[in-house]
Amino acid sequence: MKATQTRKTIPGKSSIRRPIVVAGPCSAESPEQLMKTATILAATGHVDYFRAGIWKPRTAPGSFEGMGTQALRWLQQVSQTTGLKTATEVASVRHVEEALKHNLDMLWIGARTVSNPFLVQDIADTLQGTGVRVMVKNPMAPDPDLWSGSIERFKKAGLKEICAIHRGFSYWTKSLFRNQPWWHIPMMLKERMPDVPVLCDPSHITGDHRLVPMVAHRGLEMGMDGLMVEVHPQPAKALSDASQQLTPVAFVRLIKQLFGENPGEDKAASNILEELRAEVDVMDDLLIWALTNRMKLSGEIAGVKTTHNMKPLQPERWKQVISKVLTKGREAGLRRGFIEKLFDDIHHESLSVQQPSNIRPQNNSGIHPTFAI
Ligand code: PEP
Ligand code: MN
């Protein structure tokens, strides 16, 4: 997907290439809803593709599953009336065939589908020779190989206009974001496949319309090649993803902030700070999780040692541990003194967990000691 026009993208950075913008509702709900949204988006002059989901992959059965094939005709009308190119999500060979019959300009593979190589291959085979444009979202899990592998399948099917969409990754505990941005993964993809533009989808990353501008700014700052943003004329009444869709007015405001004459630099900086803090919170969760599980393992080791009359402190083992973490720390660019202090504390805590009063001897019942109270 090549953007021809050039213009300034973000404050302080002269841009080489105009970012690609995909916008539209999460789901097509009615011809009126689509036309109303598309008319406003077309008038901004900044939207390259109008998106609307027609077949919706939902977590729970019984949720709104999309308007199906009839909505493809609505998208065709949008294209004829506004001149916008159209895009929808496909998750099966049947979807692809239907979408091709209705001359859609671009098809995207959703985060759930992209995790299934059989399905991705079937879709790629069906698209072979069509020259249609394809966008490949990242899989739910932070697995760069699965993502690049899916893109590879479309390349091998001879498709030339492919881009990737960074929509964040599922995470096991709730944080500010619906899906974690973990920017290093899209950056890794860009390094691996420099010919594939990567767009940022701040709507699915945040799950919250209030945070969408902040992550849209950050995505462009991080070098993403464009945006996919959900826009709905009445987000509160949307049949899917109600909390994360922008009103057309908010979208126009965002576009002005991003691409206007005087983008608000100060605001962008404080927004970026807020996002970085949210990422730090997630890392702190991970640290607590790792420490908790490490101490649980120490407790289990203590059980084994007690059962077999071994001493809690085994200096040889500790030497191995400290030497390994110091090497890893050095490779990661962490200060030696910091790692020594941190692991010294961890070691002391492990030993105190291994004190006789804290130990449950290993049971021989085959039951995990943690559950053998
Ligand atoms: C969508 O774009 O509306 C969608 C369902 O996205 P994802 O596959 O990223 O969840
Ligand atoms: Mn959505």
Image: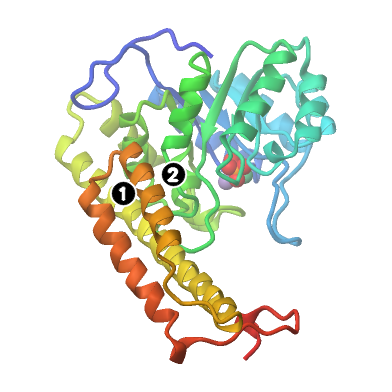
Q: Count the marks: how many?
A: 2
Q: How far is mark 2 from mark 1, CA to CA?
A: 10 Å
Quarter in which the C terminus is drawn: bottom right
Residue 228 in sight from this viewpoint = no
Q: In this rendering, is residue 152 above or below 170?
A: above
Q: Nearer the viewer, residue 45 or 291?
A: 291
Q: Is residue 258 left or right of residue 226?
A: left
Which image quadrant for residue 256? Answer: top left
Q: What's the residue at 43%, 53% (across, down)?
A: 320
Name the residue located 29 percent from the left edge and 68 percent from the top edge. Answer: 345
Residue at 51% over, 40% down: 167
Q: Residues within 10 Å of mark 2 (few under 14, many from 20)?
A: many
In the image, residue 268 above or below residue 300: above
Tag 2 near tag 1, CB within 8 Å: yes
Mark 2 or 1, nearer chain start: 2
Q: Nearer the viewer, residue 299 or 103?
A: 299
Q: Give the residue type that dot 2 points to.
A: Pro
Q: Position of residue 158 (x, y in %)?
A: 72, 10
**Left or right, residue 325 beside residue 238:** left
| Secondary structure at numbered mark 2 | loop
Q: Is mark 2 within 8 Å of ligand 1?
A: no
Residue to which mark 1 is pinned: 275
Residue 372 in the figure: left or right of residue 201: right
**Residue 36 coordinates in the image, percent (x, y):** 52, 37
Looking at the picture, how far across and down is residue 78, in whole percent? Answer: 61, 27
- Eyeballing the image, is 136 above or below 271? above
The disc label shown at residue 181, or none: 2
The front one of 366 and 141 is 366
User: Residue 85, how many percent across, how many down?
Assistant: 58, 20
